[in-house]
Amino acid sequence: MKVLLFNGSPHKEGCTYTALTEIANTLKEEGVESEIYQIGIKPIGACRACYACAKLGRCVIDDGVNAFLDYAKDFDGFIFGAPVHYASACGGATAFLDRAFFTAFSSGRGDIFMHKPGAAVASARRAGTTATLDQLNKYFTITQMPVISGRYWNMVHGHTSEEVKKDFEGMQNMRILARNMAWHLKCREAAEKAGIKLPKQEETVFTNFIR
């Protein structure tokens, strides 16, 4: 069992990284492997809505999203972390995830994410965390991913990594989130061994809001 911890922050070892590291340490205690995936500071293009991915099987913009999808396919669960910028997830993470999830769906590779558990983590100095979590959770609920929670909303507060470490409630919730993720993965493994299959899929139906 492996969980991919997505660091959508431009800071490699900042506040979001500190929260994800706490999760990684707890997952290890639970016998679950994990890796932190840093998107870095290179420019990330927004989705062009060109639908080329449906024909090419990959995003037409080659700035790291395709490499991420190739890498992500071998993981069993995902936790996406992002800092709050102007009361929502930072622009780089939003552009990256918009294209990653859309490309996976449109190119017929939805199984990269579908039915795999997902969780969101928001990091902020002060406010905007709940709006950011609502934003990130929508990637999961449109992709049939079970949403994993903690005991509180998955957020940490602080302007620096050292301040985040002093958010004792937030850091505790990162550990609870990690244990809940590990429990879900173990339940899924047990279900597969018992012969319980994934839900039956139907052909996608699109209904436009027109008369």
Image (cartoon, rainbow, N blue to C red):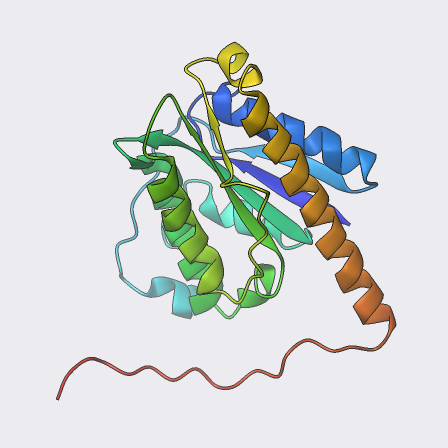
The image quarter in which residue 83 lies: top left
Rendered location of residue 207, percent (x, y): 28, 83
Asked whether 168 or 28 is in front, the reply is 168
Residue at 35% across / 23% down in the picture? 126
Rendered location of residue 30, percent (x, y): 81, 40
Q: Is residue 52 left or right of residue 58?
A: left
Residue at 49% across / 49% down in the picture? 66
Specify whether residue 177 is in view. yes
Specify whether residue 58 is in view. no
Q: Is residue 34 above or below residue 166?
A: below
Q: Is residue 100 above or below residue 159?
A: below
Residue at 68% across / 75% down in the picture? 198
Q: Is residue 51 above or below residue 90?
A: below
Q: Quarter holding the C terminus?
A: bottom left
Q: Is residue 8 left or right of residue 47?
A: right
Rendered location of residue 11, percent (x, y): 45, 20
The image quarter in which residue 22 lies: top right
Q: Is residue 53 left or right of residue 179?
A: left
Q: Is residue 90 above or below residue 108?
A: above
Asked whether 134 or 69 is in front, the reply is 134
Q: Can you name the residue that lies furthest to the left here?
A: 211
Rendered location of residue 76, percent (x, y): 69, 54
Q: Can you name the residue that lies furthest to the bottom here?
A: 211
Q: How many marks?
A: 0
Residue at 23% across / 80% down in the picture? 208
